[in-house]
Amino acid sequence: MKGYWQLTLAQLKLFARNKTVIFWTTFFPLLLMVVLGYFLGDGGSQVKLQLGWVDYDRTPASLELKEAIGLQGGFNIEDFEDNEGQAKEALKEGELSVVLVVPQGYGAALAEEEVAPPLSLFYDEVDQSEAQLSFALLEKAVDDLNKQLVHFEERISYEKIGIKATHLTYIDFLVPGIVALMIMSSNMNGVAAQIASWRERQVLRRFKISGVKARTFIAAQITARMLLNITQSILVLFVGIYLLGAQMNGSWLLLLFYIVLGILVFLSIGFIIAGLSKTPEHAAPVAGFISFPMFFLGGIFFPISEMPSFIQPLVYALPISHLSDALRQVMNIGYGLVELWLPTLALLLWFIASFTISALVFKWE
Amino acid sequence: MCAEVMIRVNNLSKSYGDLQAVDQVTFNVQAGEVFGLLGPNGAGKTTTLEMMEGLRQPDEGEIYIGGQAVHKHPERVRPLIGVQLQSTSLFDLLTVEEIFKLFASFYASSLPLEAVLERMNLTEKRTSLVKTLSGGQKQRLAIGLALLHDPAVLFLDEPTTGLDPLNRRALWDVVNGLKKDGKTIILTTHYMEEAHALCDRLAIMDQGRVIALGTPDELIASLHMESAIQFTARINKADFSTLRGVTKVLHQGDQVTLYTSKLQESLTDLIRWADTHQINLLQLQTRQATLEDVFLHLTGRSLTEE
């Protein structure tokens, strides 16, 4: 028992004093999350559409239209006066979202209470999303103005009552993925490289001569790595939730349960790699080879549903997919153990299988 | 002095595939003795040591340490022995004191830390990280770890390999100090002067076999030659065995070594022979026979040859 505590303590000291390990296992995932979160996340800031205003009419009526559009919000209006060519050029350059041309006689027709000559709206066919958004905004503005002109009286109306829906952003997707990634790389790659190197340097053999039991050694490894990883995960979660604004709609206890389960799964896989590889030079590439596809395919950065369909069954067999899935469902939706029976079962099976194999292949030298 | 047998090794054999690493090795070690296994790299010293430490299962043979049958119950011998492994890079990022505490926690009882640090001359390095230690200090740390549980028998596997002469001498002092404490010490080395300086008795190993066994002086005396005459000369073939007193002749390339029990007469004859045949004797020197010569005599190869 004394040996167990001392081994745990020694491992924690080794972690704390190894700057490379601290950087790659803690600060790198944090940095990755913050950078991706800021660049790829929408952050709630709406993009303003650029509208080029070309006015051949220049009457109070056309000014009124311009104001009505401005009131809609969503548009930055740039006035090109009657310089239509220049406005279209800017649209082609991508500087404008749309160009609205008001023909001459627009104001005169309205004053006569006649149908005004149609306005022309030029848009970029390539950028459909900006165009569609512009159409909607303009239609609303024109509609309002039409109603006003014919003294339209609304008979039917509705009241908009906002309820809070689970509106998820990329950061909500990313934070649980980063936690899963951290658990995977820290344990699988870390334990495989370290144990293989200790074996080569005869550190393990030295332990064996001193009568250290394999179970004592492994238990101490698990304890130390568990403490380290839980701390790291909580750090990432706190930064993700309180700094980047990720949602936490579920139970912290359940989240912790999946973090612990994930650590056990990847620690066991790490021990298998360490047991099967003869040298550290051998272990690191093997761990890399296994973690690399999981890095991209495991639903850490991109949803699995966006991957090619032939690859999806394979992806769902990976433990990382189930871990990131479970963490995500707890955080995003607030699912409980019952709804998450599938990833829970998958992770438990992975743990039992890899732990059994790791115990069989562990060797001191 | 009534010598008690501490270690008994009987017909020990171990092979790896086609390689017979250890072949029918037999020897006894008395309590309180420093016993050396001397031989070139690959002679089977380390394998023999590892079987004695219970780290490897022998194919054949028996090992008893302090009455315990190591070949049957390797774990029972562990409290009795302390082991310094050939490679000693432990945890670079722990301090000397932390490593001692870690290893002390593996045993039910251990010596006071201060005493071990003092004995290994590491008191000043107590709070230093292992990575800042010199080669000699690391080696003393490894021996200190082997001593922690106060074992009766110590195994030191090439403790001075890679050390500079000064640190080597310092380590010899450590070994001699441990011998004074009454430890039984088994050490391997491929430095014959080290074997001569440290060991009460030694076994010379080559290709898995013990080819000679005895005190260093006995081994040298067994050559029946006290001196060696060494020189380099360009000669095709010459019969030096007719020179007076010469008991053995060794050719290694251009280098010739003549072993003799009558140095003056052999030398006189050699010089006369060279004059007659008008041959230039280069790098002519005479010296006392050493353990190196014993090895050369027995195998026809030099100890340090790869």
Image (cartoon, rainbow, N blue to C red):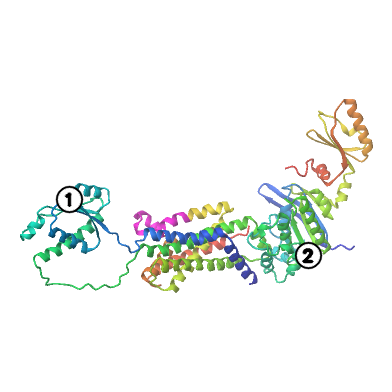
Task: State the residue in front, A18 or A74.
Answer: A74
At label 1, the amino acid type is: Asp
Q: Residues within 10 Å of mark 2 (few under 14, many from 20)?
A: many
Q: Dot 2 falls on which chain? A: B
Q: Which residue is drawn at 5% across and 59% down?
A: A114
Q: Name the residue under label 1.
A: A82
Task: State the residue in front, A246 or A362.
Answer: A246
The picture places residue A301, in percent across and down from the top left corner, at 40, 58
Q: Is mark 1 on a helix, strand or loop?
A: loop
Q: Does the magenta stretch include residue A314?
A: yes
**Residue B152 - label:** 2
Residue B295 position (above or below residue A279):
above
Q: What element carries label 2?
A: loop
Left or right of residue A146, residue B90 in this image: right
Left or right of residue B260, residue A157 in this image: left
Q: Which residue is drawn at 22% across and 58% down?
A: A134
